[in-house]
Amino acid sequence: MATETSAGRLLEQSRSRPQAPAYFVKTQGQWRPTTWSEYARQVMVVSRALVALGLKPGEATANLGFNRPEWTTFDLATSLAGGIPVGIYTTSSAPEVSFILHHARARIALVEDLSQWRKLNEERERLPLLEKVVLMKGAELPDDLEAGEITPISWETLLEAGREIPQEVVLERLSRLKSEDVATLIYTSGTTGPPKAVMLTHQNLTWTAKTALTDLLSITADDSLLSYLPLSHIAEKMFTIHGSVAAGYAIYFAQAPTSIADDLREVQPTLIFGVPRVWERLYSAVKSRLSTTTGAKARLLGGAMAVTRRAVAASCRGEKPPLLTALGYRLAQRLILQRIKPLLGLGRARICASGAAPISKEILVFFSGLDILIHEVYGQSEGCGPTTFNSPGATRLGTVGPAVPGVDVRIAEDGEVLVRGPNVFPGYFEDPGATAETLVEGWLHSGDLGALSEDGYLTITGRKKELLITSGGKNISPNNIETALKDQELISEAVVIGDGRRYLTALLVVQPEAVRQRFGEIEDLRQRPDLREAFQEAVDTVNARLARVQTVRKFQLLDEPFSVETGELTATLKLKRRVVEEKFSDLIEAMYRED
């Protein structure tokens, strides 16, 4: 029996549903489909070309660009030829790109455009193994190359390269793949050091896509997804590539990172995955817009959201709402919600998911009042994405859900979340030391702290490595405190400080729209005592719910948001705590000098 692979599933979709749409791209103002049979043909052509360029079974290729058909085609084509596709974040610096290419020993790389090609070209002396660089469709070739510079080839040239390679060559390579063979490398985002390469096998990917995603969520070929998050991240790759070929649903490729809101409104996908910062931004925008509603309209909206929350809460428990609640919910749908949701691009949304970092329960409750139920999921690259999932009819807001079927989750004596199952990776590429630390007797040591309810719902309470130990010896997880601070209307970001200190302090990034609505335009945050008093009230509100040792004694305000470009966030929008503490060390020290 042949090993099940995502490349093989693609070929099966092309045989069973040849004329159904596999993906859509917007060109000349219209979303134009590509069928499964055409998609499979494109992958086959690129796979033959990779063989012609010298790709051998077990060798890696690299992919550096925004979500486009060329990205997924190149990825699947690499797998079809027996290779190992590797994604690189577009926000990576030239040295970071060079590290991954060299570490993976990639000889062939696909890049989106000249700006990404320049990163490779800049590091060419440190990339002796790199032989071919391919530009995605439509990218211009560089003019006047100097001696020694990397000469890229066009996408069209790549397609021509494999004409002499018979299709049977790649099919034979596909037939030789084993379930335990490495299928891809996922490079971690490196919050505390150089990224590690997570090896995922064909079994990891195909089992997770089928059992922990499409079967669990009842996803079918009638669903659709807007692909916009980095495909280098396991979650987006699972939804866009592996889930799609498993269930047969269509992918819409976002036009650009800046067009996502417009694309959502046009496409109205049924499946939406977002990291917490995506939902936080949407929450701030919607809440700001709704705050302008007054009088009778405001009372009508408030009533509609209240009854909808009650109806959604019943559905989360797998129950039918009481008769009056059901009637009120249907009325709210007809009069209000059916108008609001399409404006957000969520008019047809069936599954909305959030993962990769904690999300505030307040945001989840708010959206449930708009009949938008966000299912929180928990996992990591080492677990191939989902480990626990709040699925339809079995959702508990504030938790990350129960373990997906076939996966075991338990809590170690020190509170660490341990995972075992077919989704768990075999180890880190060329890093036996890190592998031995993370995989112990078949259990993945996640590095996350958590608690399990009696009926198996997992709550994440913090990161083991991010525990703050005060000078008084108290262990404090900053995550929940930061999440509570970000729930306050004026606060966009929060970083709690206190490791080795007598008490906790915080850096607070202002929410600009909320501040403008309340105080008008402000040039200097430090010149407005009334603004600082408002933030003190917000901090006091959070402190009132915390144990004394967890309270934030002092804070500093920041008016510039954290970003990938300025270095405070990883490519997956996770906080680089060490970078923040170093960058704002003067402000932090000032809070501890003013005793």
Image: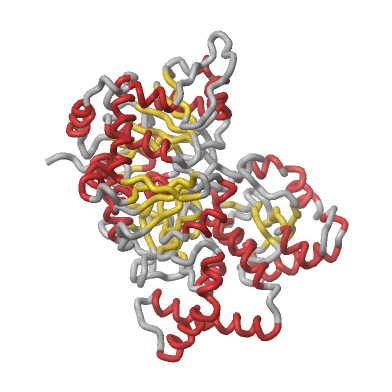
Of the 4 image quadrants, the one containing the C terminus is bottom right
Camera-side residue of 275 and 44: 44
**Residue at the extreme left:** 1
User: In the displayed structure, would residue 176 be above or below residue 423?
Assistant: above
Left/right placement of residue 233 relative to residue 444 reads: right
User: In the displayed structure, would residue 517 be above or below residue 556?
Assistant: below
Residue at 31%, 40% in the rendered image: 38
Residue 420 visible in rendering: no
Task: Give the number of marks.
Answer: 0
Left/right placement of residue 550 relative to residue 273 reads: right
Residue 159 position, x and y percent, is 36, 26
Camera-side residue of 41 and 579: 41
**Residue at the extreme bottom:** 324
Of the 4 image quadrants, the one containing the N terminus is top left
User: In the displayed structure, would residue 158 be above or below residue 527?
Assistant: above
Residue 289 position, x and y percent, is 66, 68
Residue at 53%, 22% in the rendered image: 141
Left/right placement of residue 170 relative to residue 91 reads: left
**Residue at the extreme top:** 147
Residue 432 position, x and y percent, is 35, 32
Residue 121 visible in rendering: yes
Residue 582 position, x and y percent, is 68, 40
Residue at 27%, 55% in the rendered image: 211
Q: Quadrant of residue 215?
A: bottom left
- What colouring method underlies this structural image? secondary structure
Camera-side residue of 227 and 205: 227
